[in-house]
Amino acid sequence: MPNNRFHTIVTTVENKPGVLARVAGLFSRRGFNIESLAVAPTDDERFSRITFTVDVESAPLEQVVNQLDKLINVVSIRELDPRSSVSRELMLVTVSVSDGHRSRILAHVDDFRAYVLNENSSVMMLSLSARPTRLDDFEEVLRPYGIVELQRTGRVALPSLTDEA
């Protein structure tokens, strides 16, 4: 069941210096809490796509959208309903590998469909792209082995595909 506290907002903005700073400044000034943030250029080099996961307990969603709409470099704003969209996040994690644990860690890698990116005799670097809750589960499974370093990207999302044409 989706968590109604967090909403995903996808904003297309002009790909110009300072736009992200203005958008982030708006959130800061208004006291809106951003749970996740991802930014990248679109297929059209004139635009970038900013994907926010916003904590709507910090401010009503309508207020967030209205404030974004006032910024001059914002081209479009779209809220993605969790029931009709697909979202993913990427995790890179380095985990300790002690004697006897390597095979168990590799079993978890297989179970979660993660990837081994790099390894040596003492640590293993893993990668997983999945729903944020699945990343949480993977992190919890790895924690007893000793997480050396962990980095997660912001959530990215697109509307689900439909059969309507």
Image (cartoon, rainbow, N blue to C red):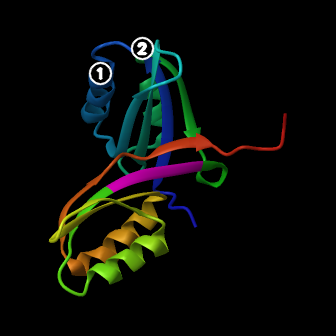
- Looking at the image, the residue that sits furthest to the bottom is 100
Please tell me which of labels 2 and 1 falls first in the chain. 1
- Observer-nearest of 28 and 143: 143
Magenta range: 86-91
SS majority, magenta: strand
Q: Is residue 163 left or right of residue 11?
A: right
Q: Amino acid at mark 2?
A: Asn
Q: Which quadrant of the view contains residue 39?
A: top left
Q: Is residue 69 visible?
A: no
- Quadrant, the N terminus: bottom right
- Observer-nearest of 143 and 87: 143
Residue highlighted by disc 1:
22
- Observer-nearest of 115 and 43: 115
Mark 1 residue element = helix
Task: Work out whether 104 lies above or below 4.
Answer: below
Q: Please provide percent x and percent y for residue 100.
A: 24, 87
* Mark 2 and mark 1 residues within 8 Å of each other at the beta carbon: yes
Task: Work out whether 26 lies above or below 32.
Answer: above
